[in-house]
Every structure is written in C-alpha cells, then in structure tokens.
Image (cartoon, rainbow, N blue to C red):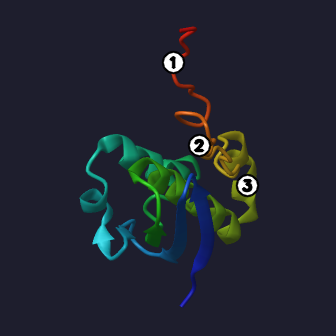
Amino acid sequence: MEQYYGTGRRKRSVARVFLRPGSGKIIINKRDFTEFFKRDIYKIVVKEPLEITEQADNFDVFATVKGGGTTGQAGALRHGLARALVNFNEENRPALRKAGMLTRDAREVERKKYGLKGARARFQFSKR
C-alpha cells in the first residue's frame, strides 16, 4: 500500500503523519479529528496544508501525536502534514514554503533560573 510520511514538531509536541490515498478522513491517535480537537481553530490549522495544495479529498491522514498541549499538537500535525505532502509531490514545496508550513517553529519555553521567580521575572525589590 502506498503511503507518505512526515514528522512534525512544535513546542514539546511530536506528530507522526501518514498520508494514504483515500477520501479525506483524518484520524489522530485512533480517534476522528473532530473528536480529538474540540475547537475550530485547531481544525483549521491542521487542514491548512491540504487546502493550500488542494489535496483535501485525495488523501486519508493517519497521525499519532505525543507531548505538549493542544496548540502544540495542532502545530506539529500541520508541520508533519506539510512534510508528508512534499514527500508525495515535490511540486507542493514552493506553495507550502511560501505559507511558512515547512519551517520548524523553534520557540520553546525558556527555563526558570535560580534566584528568580521565573525565567526572567524577579521577586519584588524593596530597599528596606
């Protein structure tokens, strides 16, 4: 069976995305994606690469996603889906690159430093 693979990452989330020729259903962690993502914004984010390349009804998407929260997972799925579409057809690369979907979003949470309240926040200073 023919399938295309892409790994996507965002924050602490990692998504493994498999594209198979089909009718357009999206399964994430063995659940339908409308059940997996309750908010519409996440559904839009995940479908974006398919709509840009006009492949929404040509493929079934099977994905496993681990780590992070819902925003990171949606971003990781989008990144993995874009990479899988490039594996399917190299001609998809310019359109996806222009939309910024092949670029790994490198922003991560900065670690908390010792002696401070957070990564950069200090405790309140008082002269006396």
Q: Are marks 3 and 2 in contact (CB under 8 Å)?
A: no
> Do the numbered discs 2 and 1 sit on residues whose CB atoms are within 8 Å?
no
Q: Position of residue 5 (x, y in %)?
A: 61, 75
Which residue appears farthest toward the bottom when viewing the image? Answer: 1
Which residue is label 2 attached to? 112
Left or right position of 104 against 119 = right
Q: Nearer the viewer, mark 1 or mark 3?
A: 1
Residue 71 horizontal/vertical position (percent) = 44, 47
Identify the mark at residue 4; answer none if there is no mark: none
Identify which amino acid the numbered label 2 is placed on.
Lys
Q: Is residue 54 visible?
A: no
How far is the residue under mark 2 from the one under mark 1?
Answer: 16 Å
Question: With respect to residue 4, does 47 lie above or below?
Answer: above
The answer to whether residue 10 is above or below residue 90 is above
Lower position in the chain sequence, tag 3 or tag 2 = 3
Please give the residue where the numbered disc 3 appears in the rendered image: 93
Nearer to us: label 3 or label 2: 2
Residue at numbered disc 1: 124
- Residue at screen point 50% across, 47% down: 48
Q: Amino acid at mark 3?
A: Arg
SS at circle 2: loop
Q: Residue at x 50, y 77 (%)?
A: 20
Q: Amino acid at mark 1?
A: Gln
Q: Is residue 24 above or below residue 44?
A: below
